Amino acid sequence: MSPQTYHLAADHDGLSLPQALKRLLPELSWSQIRKLISGRQVQVNGNLCLDEGRRVQAGDVLKLSDHPLAKPAEASDIRIVYLDEHLVVVQKPAGVTTLRHREETDLRERRKQLQPTLDELLPQVLAAHLGMRRSLDRSGGGGSNSKSPRRAAKRRRGRAPATDPRLVVRPVHRLDRDTSGLMVFARTAAAEQKLIRMFAKHAVQRAYVAVAHGRVEAQTIDTWLVRDRGDGLRGSSPLGDAAQRAQRAITHLRPMEHLPVYSIVECRLETGRTHQIRIHLAERGHMLCGEKTYTHAVGGQPQDDNSRAPRHALHAAELAFVHPITNQPLRFQMPLPKDLREWLLQLRSANHRV
């Protein structure tokens, strides 16, 4: 099957993913449709979807791949770089959502385990890090019937129960699904409250590495972001803070390396709005390599992306803050992950530096 993209219309609204695909591809049998989904060949709005129970909406974009896409992130892909009784700092891999969307919180556990979120995987990561895995397995995973070998095996493959206070994580910020990099989670209510206040007061330093189109010069971008710029996408409003509950967004850009048609840029956030870096770069004509959403101005044509980036090229490389309980200064750095390193090597081999 060759790659295909479909924009769903009103008559697809509310259908399950298999039903929508069957309507689009009537020549395929139901078993072939399900095989496409389980075989990691279906994306919904740019994200791999393995959930046959997913309901689609008008305006969704379905993309069929001619080959299996990368597997969803697993607990073994997550690294702990700092841990104490109050907080944990981890390296988030690309391809995993930080938190489950509100409309998905009531999904059955089986459906959640198809594509777990970072906060759902972390209890299992913490259990392994703390040496709790063996005792959890022996105890039957928190009270379930341990007499069934099949159930016991499923528990061992699934995430560890988070009823033990040592395994509870409390999210205080997010990274986009396809953004890799450093994240901090609170482990106590006191740390959670203080970290949330620190993020709100912009007391947490965050630096990202981005690869963008064109020659990006050093600059500070200061705009007011709104949820809907006029075409359903987030963007900057020329009307300022009085418009549509706009939020001020400030990004400091520093070029790290210029290639003939791309730039590697350090992006330091003074504020932390949803999709802030992606929006700011695109609005300056420097779309992020691998970007699938912010590709054009309102009413304009999507910018071509010939970079062949494996995902949107954005990585949270630095995280620094004062410990919310001990007041100890903490700073963490994470190099680019393998997928972006290898892609950049290909870019450099194909282009001489400016």
Image (cartoon, rainbow, N blue to C red):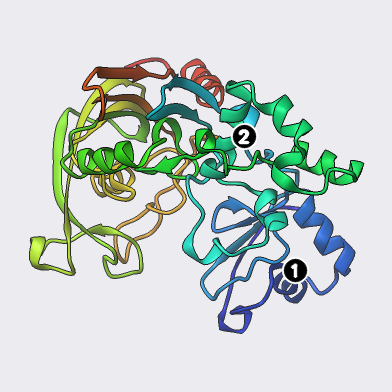
Residue at 65% in and 35% down: 74
Pick the front one: 227 or 23: 227
In the depicted structure, whether residue 58 falls above or below residue 290: below
Q: Residue 90 at x, y = what percent?
A: 46, 27
Identify which residue is drawn at 55% across, 42% down: 96
Residues tagged 2 and 1 counted as in contact (Cβ below 8 A): no
SS at circle 2 = helix
Q: Is residue 250 above or below residue 131?
A: below
**Residue 228 image offset from top left, x and y in percent:** 29, 67
Label 2 and label 1: CA atoms lie apart by: 31 Å
Residue 234 is situated, as x and y percent measured from the top left of the image, at: 31, 59
Q: Is residue 175 visible?
A: no
**Residue topped by disc 2:** 124
Of the numbered discs 2 and 1, the one sitting upstream in the chain is 1
Q: Amino acid at mark 2?
A: Gln
Task: Tell me the residue at 59%/79% (across/down).
Answer: 13
Q: Is residue 242 left or right of residue 131?
A: left
Q: Which residue is mark 1?
A: 18
Q: Is residue 214 left or right of residue 17?
A: left
The residue positioned 69% from the left and 68% from the top of the image is 17
Residue 159: percent from the left, percent from the top?
66, 40
As drawn, 50 above or below 289? below
Q: Amino acid at mark 1?
A: Pro
Crowding around mark 2 (Cα neighbors within 10 Å: few <14, some 14 to 19, many 20+) is many
Task: Identify the image quadrant of the N terminus.
Answer: bottom right
Residue 279 appears in the picture as rendered: yes
